Image: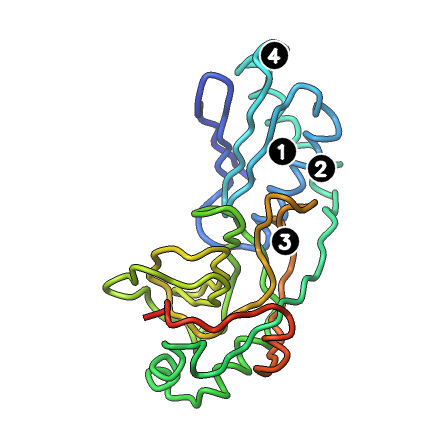
Amino acid sequence: MTIDIQIAGENALIVYFGEGLSDHVSQHIQSVAGGLSVWVGSLLIDMVPSYASLMVIFNPALTDHLRVRQLIREAAQDARVQGMQTPSRLITLPVYYGAQAAPDLARLAENAGLSCQQVIDLHSAMEYRVYAIGFAPGFAYLGEVDARIAAPRLATPRKKVPKGAVAIADRQTAVYPASSPGGWNLIGLCPQPMFDPNAEPTMPVQVGDKVRFAAIDIGRFLSLGGQLTNGAG
């Protein structure tokens, strides 16, 4: 796989592996990051994987751009790295898809020519790969949803999306880790905290994990600490 390495700061490089969503590209990024961590982790401060890129932040007291660029190329071409299987966990997140928690579900279903239950069934039937974490701490970009329930972002974003909102935008899905503005289509609420700075680990998912959603009823949602709010309007 051809890679493109660019300077991203005085002690950082960003490596581009391609464009768009791809399990193959994502796995290759994870393998290269894993290889670098094992072989030269002492030179690095952090690595930040995304859809088709890897940010490599190094310790400038120990190495430099030229050396790290060489190490990245070696890792990307090394057969041991290409065959490396990065451990992947399957995380199940509970979701209450009730009407009061899903202001966009009926519209999304109507536009797709489906019932609300069919949308729920399709959304909860898939295993989604965590491609990136960004926008806000704990906001995991998951893909890909079934093409039948893909939906564009709202023309006018909401000023306030509630914490735990489960949403779809194009062929991605996500859980809002905190109340914030947002333009995704809201189809449910998840009571599982997606970011807790006082917990270890701080997030229940990481890049490379797989996520499934499990439909729950209102009683289970409330027992897990979920809260209904009118903040989705």
The C terminus sits in image quarter: bottom left
- Mark 3–mark 4 Cα distance, whole angstroms, equals 31 Å
> Which residue was labeled with disc 3?
205
The N terminus sits in image quarter: top right
Which of the pair 214/3 is nearer the observer? 214
The disc label shown at residue 81, or none: 2
The amino acid pointed to by label 1 is: Ala
Q: Are marks 3 and 4 in contact (CB under 8 Å)?
A: no
Q: Earlier in the sequence, mark 1 or mark 2?
A: 1
Q: Earlier in the sequence, mark 2 or mark 4?
A: 4
Which of the pair 63/181 is nearer the observer? 181
Q: Earlier in the sequence, mark 3 or mark 1?
A: 1
In this rendering, the answer to whether 160 lies above or below 216 is above
Q: Quadrant of residue 81?
A: top right
Which of the pair 140/29 is nearer the observer? 140
- Mark 2–mark 4 Cα distance, whole angstroms, equals 22 Å
Q: Nearer the viewer, mark 3 or mark 1?
A: 3
Bin the neighbour count of mark 4 within 10 Å (Cα to Cα): few under 14, some 14-19, many 20 and up: few
Q: Residue at image x 29%, y 66%? A: 154
Q: Are marks 3 and 2 in contact (CB under 8 Å)?
A: no
Query: Residue 18, how many percent across, how many down?
Result: 47, 44
- Mark 1–mark 2 Cα distance, whole angstroms, equals 7 Å
In the picture, measured across the screen, residue 142 lies left or right of residue 6, that is: right
- Mark 3–mark 2 Cα distance, whole angstroms, equals 23 Å
The disc label shown at residue 76, or none: 1
The amino acid pointed to by label 3 is: Val
Query: Residue 150, how many percent across, how many down?
Result: 41, 71
